[in-house]
Amino acid sequence: MSDSGEDARLGAANAFVEEDRLGLFSFAVAEKRSEYLAVLRAFDTARANYVVLLHSGDVADLIARSPGRHDALTTLDIAPLLDQLHTWGLLERSYDGTRAATLAEYRNRHFVYQFGQAGYKAYRAVEDVLGARLDDASLSRLVLPELLADMHELAEANRQADGDRIYRKLSRLDSTLSEMATRAAHFYLVLGDLVRTTEITPESFLAHKDALLTHMREFSSDLTRYAPKLAEAIALVESTGIEELVDRAAISDERVFLSVDERRADWTDRWAGLSHWFVAAESELSESERLREGTMSAIAAVLSLLRRVTETRKGGVSRESQLRHLAGWFA
């Protein structure tokens, strides 16, 4: 097969997988989306209690006991919901002959259901969106001293060839930096929304301007102070032997479905990402430097916005008043 034919085949396969995965979210826009969500929440509750397989009767009991649920669903109501969730790929279905009390019931093959891996991720994604507080945004400056302490402990663990401790510290560093990056991105998105809506509702901006500026200045100051220390700590870790560190982390890694070589490659990439956060490559900025520059730019933008809002309120002219004035001329 030619390279172009192979590429076309892989492209079609990827498109099919993508379309299939998008279908997992069908329950969120379906007519009975509240019922589907109640069923999936019942499976999530059972999963938290280490119960994986559920029959329609089990789901009905869980929904009836859920707080704030007044329109309890019966077993007959739930059965078609389960079938549809299975069709969309959120739930896996299997036969449970142990529930059959008679031969006729056994022939009817009682079904039990459980979350599929992709289905659970789709459900959690929807729940995360529903439960997100879009105004709950902050920069995580308090993790910087924790990162520094973890780096020094990681260097000591590598000197002692303590693989389990290396794995725990690397995992914590990776998750902490990922959360820091995610929170920073979220913060600046919320800040952008605030800037865009200020001309219509300046009060929301003026009510938080002092805390906002203080928060960004403190974060920038701490990042400036800790970034060189973290770069030195990374150099200290690397002086103990990065290849040995990655090998020990890969051996202690508990992801049993990956080979040791795959885990080693994964941790090599993760360490490169960790290092790039505070150690700049040649003629490039480190991620911490980019974040610090972005924070300083945001402070300047907020101060400029504050000046415009103050002048507008003093002059009595705003985008809203300008539009009303223009509409008056047209009328």
Image (tube, rainbow, N blue to C red):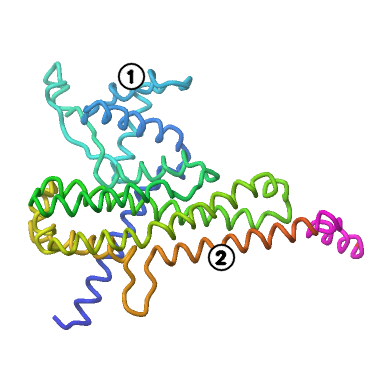
Q: Position of residue 9 (x, y in %)?
A: 22, 72
Q: Residue furthest top?
A: 101
Residue wearing tag 2:
297
Pick whichever of labels 1 and 2 is earlier in the sequence.
1
Q: Magenta segment, which residues?
A: 312-330
Image: 176 above or below 56: below
Name which residue type carries label 1: Asp
Q: Say what secondary structure mark 1 lies in.
A: helix
Q: Position of residue 94 (x, y in %)?
A: 17, 35
Q: Horizontally, is 155 left or right of 211 in the view?
A: left
Q: Quadrant of residue 304?
A: bottom right
On whether residue 313 falls in the magenta region, the answer is: yes
Looking at the image, which residue is at 67% across and 54% down?
A: 197
Image: 326 above or below 33: below
Looking at the image, which residue is at 44% across and 51% down?
A: 183
On whether residue 192 falls in the magenta region, the answer is: no
In the image, 252 versus 75, the foreground residue is 252
Q: Position of residue 177 (x, y in %)?
A: 34, 54
Q: Quadrant of the C terminus?
A: bottom right
Image: 148 above or below 282: above
> Majority secondary structure of the magenta segment?
helix
In the image, 132 versus 100, the foreground residue is 132
Looking at the image, which residue is at 24% across and 35% down?
A: 114
Residue wearing tag 1:
61
Q: CA distance from mark 1 to mark 2?
A: 54 Å
Looking at the image, which residue is at 43% across and 57% down?
A: 223
